[in-house]
Image (spheres, coloured by chain):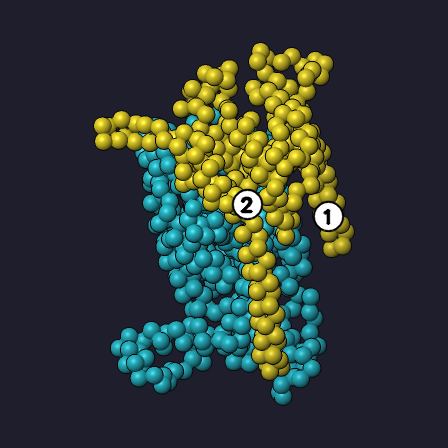
Chain colours: A yellow, B cyan
Amino acid sequence: MRSLKSAILSAAVALGLAGAAQASEAVHIPKQEWSHSGVFGTIDKASAQRGFQIYKEVCSTCHSAKLVPIRTLAGIGFNEDELKAIAAGYEVQAGPNDAGEMFMRPGIPADRFPSPFPNDNAARAANNGALPPDLSLMAKARVGGEDYLYAFLTGFEENPPEGVTLMPGMNYNKYFPGHQVGMPNILMPDGVTYADGTPATVQQQAHDISTFLTFIAEPHMDARKQMGVKVILFLIVLAGLMYATKRKLWSTLH
Amino acid sequence: MAQAHAPQFKNPVVKWIDSRLPIFTMLDHEYNQYPMPRNVNYLWAFGAIAGIMLVIMIATGLVLAMQYAANTHIAFESVERIMRDVNYGWLLRYVHANGASMFFIAVYIHMFRGLYYGSYKAPREILWILGVFILLAMMATAFMGYVLPWGQMSFWGATVITNLFSAFPLVGDPIVTWLWGGFSVDNPTLNRFFALHFLLPFVLLGLVVLHTAALHVSGSNNPLGIDAKGPQDTVPFNPYVTVKDGFAVVVFLIFYAGFVFFAPNYLGHPDNYIPANPLVTPAHIVPEWYFLPFYAILRAIPDKLGGVLAMFGAIAVLAALPWLDTSKVRSCKFRPIYRQFFWILAIDALVLGYAGAMPAEGVWLLVARIGTAYYFFHFLILLPLLGKLERPLPLPASICEPVLKGGGRVAAGAHAKPMEKA
């Protein structure tokens, strides 16, 4: 019995190691420090607001975030007037009016972020055939989540390693699956000027935009975790009471 | 139920109804007085836990269905609307999505408990077979539910699984067209999957009622695998087992809540947050974790039809289990050799699950093939032979004997014969 158990264990360990060896062939995505990670972590609102600035000034020239209403930004600390001002900065198509025509009007917080292109084909036509993916869920739609986004945004290399020939119009990225990506290296030192005076290094920008994308992918994350702590504390107390009741009841049996 | 006596209801309304339609008497018999073997351990709580999971799934699913739109153009967006705009929609969806995994965890533990303690043996064969049908209905429901968000894994999972039926000669392709309602997975497929995903849980509920009815005929098995011989061997279901199961349910809910609130997407696949695109195939199409052992069996067989038959055979063989296991002794406690093979089977299932998550090539294909061969070897060859070859340990005379042996206060008149206990 004992020898059988140890044989099974060693087989399981061997399998686990083989699995780990295989996994290590894939590119390792370094973990970053996030204020929102962990059970008690919450979104860093200042960082997410800076991330929104990058989204607005940089990302949204090519990428849409069409599932996200502008009012969502209340969750990172913008007040109602600020939201109205942000929304009014966008032109939104509305209509048809009484004459049957579509028209443009300033955005309101209930509108979703307008997309830079009218449709996917237009987006491809403007981007060398590549389709810039929608960013609404980007932080949840890639293996590695926000760590991957950070790695991707800081993982561009001007010159690909020896032996790699880039296809025309493609760029080399250490972390992108296949390493060749249509998107160019877009984050430049001081490419944006932060209103709060934070130095806009590439790392800082990548961190901020990844925080922002995490927020828009899951706007209720903070509320979810806070409710989770309460629910689990309640359940632990309830379990203790149930166990005490069970012990008392069953002790009468013997 | 032999010791059941007619309850006296004090409430005149209850009394009036019960004398015309004895539902209160029935409930009292089945859930109040129902005699449970007093030695059942916490593994017996997983039946109750699975039942609770079904109720949670139906309740959350009903509310989600009120918000969801089964149309390929807006299905993905309607799920995101639930996540973002519906009050506590994120909670409902995460409870439902993780609930599917929790339901399978509970049912798989429940099944392995049945395997370990021989709960499928006479007179519980029909009870066990109903359980196999429950598993099938769960699998169909879970598969169709995973299609509804209409993400990349939804679409490609549906394509792969429905295409399996094309393996059957002659009728295969027409069956697939019929399943799809067209010539590819598309809007008609999504529509019917939604309709069936709504219907099947109620079929499941009906099967659970039958499963419970069959259970209450023979009574619950217990860790010793011997029959209860009288009231001294049992306790009334309520309050003893309701409280014990209640405690186990709460502990399970803590585990469940851990996923819902702190790792809600851990058991899912990131690709399903990308809207379905028939023109882009994901690098690896992987089913949900609870299908992985069966997926490994499917891919282990080099022939498509053979793979499909092996996969369904892996479940069908469970239905034949009461007759494949020739041993008269139920519990593994008294089957020293089978006990070891039980654990090998459990590890085999885990290894198959791991292999199912890996690309079907190289060493993982070999692992899946060995695992598949062993799975069928266990049920088709080992179990029939083992029942004849193995010498089981002597069985105790009754349930209360070993239970009370260590208890200190032995009831007067109980046997004090030393027991060989595994």
Q: Is residue A178 visible?
A: no
Q: Nearer the viewer, mark 1 or mark 2?
A: 2
Amino acid at pointer 2: Gly
The reply, left or right, for residue B281 in relation to residue A153 is left
Q: Which residue is disc 2 drawn over?
A: A77
Q: Position of residue B237 (x, y in %)?
A: 49, 74
Regarding mark 2 in the picture, which secondary structure is present there? loop
Q: Position of residue A228 (x, y in %)?
A: 56, 56
For label 2, the crowd category at 10 Å Cα-Cα, with few meaning under 14, some 14 to 19 and many 20 or more, is some
- Which residue is at a point 60% across and 68% down the rendered structure image? A237
Please state if B169 lies on the left or on the right of B376 as rendered. Answer: left
Q: Tell me, for residue A9, which label it has, or none.
A: 1
Residue at x 61% of width, y 34% of height = A195
Q: Are marks 1 and 2 in contact (CB under 8 Å)?
A: no
Q: Secondary structure at mark 1?
A: helix
Q: Determine which quarter of the picture holds residue B77.
A: top left
